[in-house]
Amino acid sequence: MRGRAWEVRLFPFSFEEFLRHHGLQVPEPPFLLSAEEKTRLQAALLQYLEVGGFPEAQGVQPADRFQLLADYVDVAILRDVIERHEVANVTSLRWMVRHLLGIPGGHFSVEKFHRTLKSQGLAVSRDTLHEFLRYLEDCFLVRVTWVEADSERRRMVNPRKVQPVDPGLIPVYDRSGKANQGHALETVVRVELERRRAEIHYVKTREGYEVDMLARWPKGREELIQVAADLTDPETLQREVRALQAAGKENPRAKKTLVTLTPEAVDPLPEDVHLQDAAFWLLHPGEDRPGHPLSGESSTPGSFWTEPSA
């Protein structure tokens, strides 16, 4: 059967699947909802960003959910990495896992991490760390995003952005004690783009501005996507728009999109910047997304206006 395999990727629940799992009606475009309906949809999205999309984590108390997800990570490390690849330096691998899951959406440099391990007395080669990162991506524990670059050298020397495969993992490993809605939202947007079969990079402009994602689809469509959970601060809005416009000059074919939880707080934007409510963006099929896997089922499995399970 060599050469005849067809890879099918299974992700944790998308936001649409999360709603269906909890028996909630999935609204369809053009999303003509009342203010109360929008509020309830936003509440469901906030719960999704907190709980994540692993089926067994739904309806579980936080302490039990954290333990369950930590066990998932341990199983992935043991079976999918250590046993499969016969990893000998388990200590360094575990350091990397804790580091990556503790900086969702952050930049990761193998060179810097190698120096950190060396300072702790852990001997490991840079090549081994590169292999560890590849193993962790292959086992679907993290998703790695490379910088958009016109040369392989620039691509290699820039740090990668690393996110967990599910937002539910973020509070398990984050020790800052802060709300991480921004990191969680960027994570679900990143994974949703991969679910829609986009090729994804992040953009670093010549002026030093950064855009979270540049998505390209097989049909040729391109989209620059900036994710910001809260845009009520005018300075934050200005910074995000400035980065999009700078990246747009270097990628003139790309549509410029700003995804947020607070679209109602945003003043009029430049005509070339498209504002997207995060809940609606996650539910919109998009012209390049494969058909709904549940399209044959009823669109009203339950009342949407029932609160999701705790």
Image (cartoon, rainbow, N blue to C red):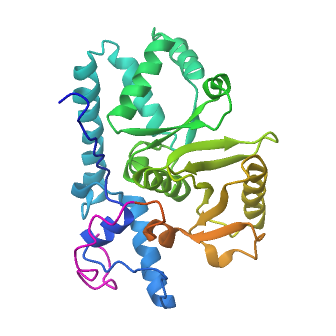
Q: Residue at x 60, y 21 (%)?
A: 112
Q: Residue at x 45, y 10 (%)?
A: 124
Q: Is residue 162 left or right of residue 139?
A: right
Q: Nearer the viewer, residue 244 or 239?
A: 244
Q: Nearer the viewer, residue 182 or 271?
A: 271
Q: Residue 149 falls in which quadrant of the image?
A: top right
Q: Measured along the vertical axis of the image, is residue 108 above or below residue 291? A: above
Instruction: Tell whether position 301 is magenta.
Output: yes
- Residue 69 pos. (x, y %): 29, 46
Q: Is residue 237 left or right of residue 10?
A: right
Q: Nearer the viewer, residue 103 or 276?
A: 276
Examine the rendering and report whether any part of residue 309 can be seen. no
Instruction: Provide the major secondary structure of the magenta segment.
Output: loop
> The N terminus appears in which quarter of the rendering?
top left
- Residue 215 pos. (x, y %): 56, 50
Looking at the rendered structure, the number of numbered marks drawn on it comes to: 0
Q: Is residue 195 left or right of residue 267?
A: left
Instruction: Tell whether position 163 is magenta.
Output: no
Q: Measured along the vertical axis of the image, is residue 178 above or below residue 277? A: above
- Residue 58 pos. (x, y %): 26, 61
- Residue 279 pos. (x, y %): 48, 71
Q: Measured along the vertical axis of the image, is residue 82 above or below residue 260? A: above
Q: Residue at x 57, y 40 (%)?
A: 106
Q: Residue furthest left?
A: 1
Q: Residue at x 66, y 55 (%)?
A: 254
Q: Measured along the vertical axis of the image, is residue 13 above or below residue 46? A: above
The magenta stretch is 290-310
